[in-house]
Image (tube, rainbow, N blue to C red):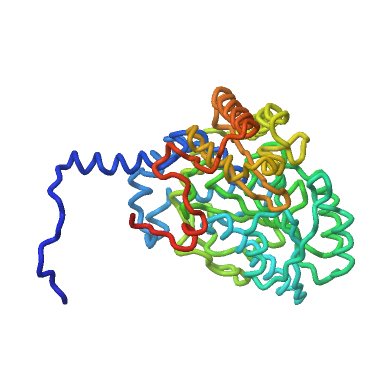
Amino acid sequence: MEKRTSEIKLKDKTELEIMRHYKELSDKNFCIEKGFYPLGSCTMKYNPRINEWTSKLEGFANLHPNQEDSDCQGALQIMYELQNYLKIITGMDAICLQPCAGAHGEFSGMMVIKKYFEDKNDLRKKVIIPDNAHGTNPASAAMCGFEVVEVKSNDKGLVDVDELKKLVAEYSSDIAAIMMTNPNTLGLFDSNVLEISDIMHKNGSLLYYDGANFNAIMGHTNPRLMGFDVVHVNLHKTFSTPHAGGGPGAGPIGTTRELAQFLPVPRVEFDGEKYIRNYNYPKSIGKVATFFGNFNVMVKAYTYIRMLGKHLKNVSEDAVLAANYIKESLKNDYKIAFDTICAHEFVIDNSDKKDLGTSTLDIAKRLMDENIHPATIYFPLIVHEAFMVEPTESETKAVLDNFINVMKKIALEIKDGVDFHEFPKNTPISRADEVLAARHPDLKE
């Protein structure tokens, strides 16, 4: 063993000085407690402190994952009840909590679909995915060995049903599933979803529901009513637990009764006397995470659902109202990509601003000096200079009005020829070299 031969060169600091140092560092980070966070397609809502309190209770925080079932009945009960709540909310017959993120849930759900067809000795190879889908959709399908077939959107931003029919006719019995988000990534509810479901099911294909935008529909509809067979739900988005920066997250998956036997194990069940982890599912795809996934996130989501109860429906109503309020307030200053009633988010097309010398990236950087986190930019790819806004239900009208006023001010600055390339000016670092930062990140300075 090597031993240090010289003293560690550390400055003598008091506890107070050290605390001030780390507090100063934390102040340089932007968080939802610091300002508005309209990050479209990701539902970055406020995380109530009660969630943090319950997740830190000693019986949860200090519980070892190798405990016997008899020693962790409370934790298993929470997971069991959370499964049941998600069954009601999604309309599915069975839920597995194990996946640790949305993309992980997608991967697990597609593995279930693959196993379903293998069990039928019907080896289908293709998955249809809309051109406005989240990027993880084609990645998850490809990782499971499927070939991705893109279906175009129509002029309303919805799945082109005629195009879909042509693809189904062309590939027929080789199509395993279609992966959809509804509302989609443009913030539009696809009113053709039942026709799409009918087309796919008549072809013997399944429908996969990406639950990233679930915040828009709670209590008003669910994937089962739309005809979906497999779904994942992002607990860390819709059900208010901290996320981004790589986690932690949770992406439970649900299925219809026909596919339930293929879900990951263990499954939390109640035998009439106690809660157990049941591994006895011979056709399961197996484990997809260490132990049982991110249990701490499950406790937070469980708390959120229990606190709101039937008022989860109000969450979606407020989120949709906020998005439409902002959209209507900005439509005279910005080009709305699809100017119709939206769901929880909408997309601005800044191509006309680009013609004036200001890009979507410039607008995003300008927002940072107003203590507003930039919205999602350049996604979905089918909208040039896309700027996606999702206010969620967390914010007051005053916050929404401030955002609207800032965006109007920026629109006037663009008309006046203000040079946006120096923004942001008031953040810990100014405009970064995006390419250099991506290719050669320095995490030490």
In terms of image quadrants, where is residue 142? Answer: bottom right
Q: Residue at x 77, y 48 (%)?
A: 226
Would residue 133 appear left or right of 101 to someone viewing this image? right
Q: Position of residue 425 (x, y in %)?
A: 45, 38
Q: Looking at the picture, does residue 148 appear above or below residue 348? A: below
Residue 369: give x, y in percent of width and height.
48, 35
Q: Is residue 40 visible?
A: yes
Q: What residue appears at the point 50 percent right and 52 percent down from the top-left corner?
A: 249
The quadrant the C terminus occupies is bottom left
Out of 23 and 247, give the one closest to the viewer: 23
Q: Relative to 5, does residue 212 appear above or below in the rendering?
A: above
Residue at image point 63% right, 71% down: 283
Question: Front-most of 292 and 371?
Answer: 371
Q: Give left or right: position of 269 versus 442.
A: right
Q: Position of residue 373 (x, y in %)?
A: 51, 39
**Seen in the image, is 139 located left or right of residue 180?**
left
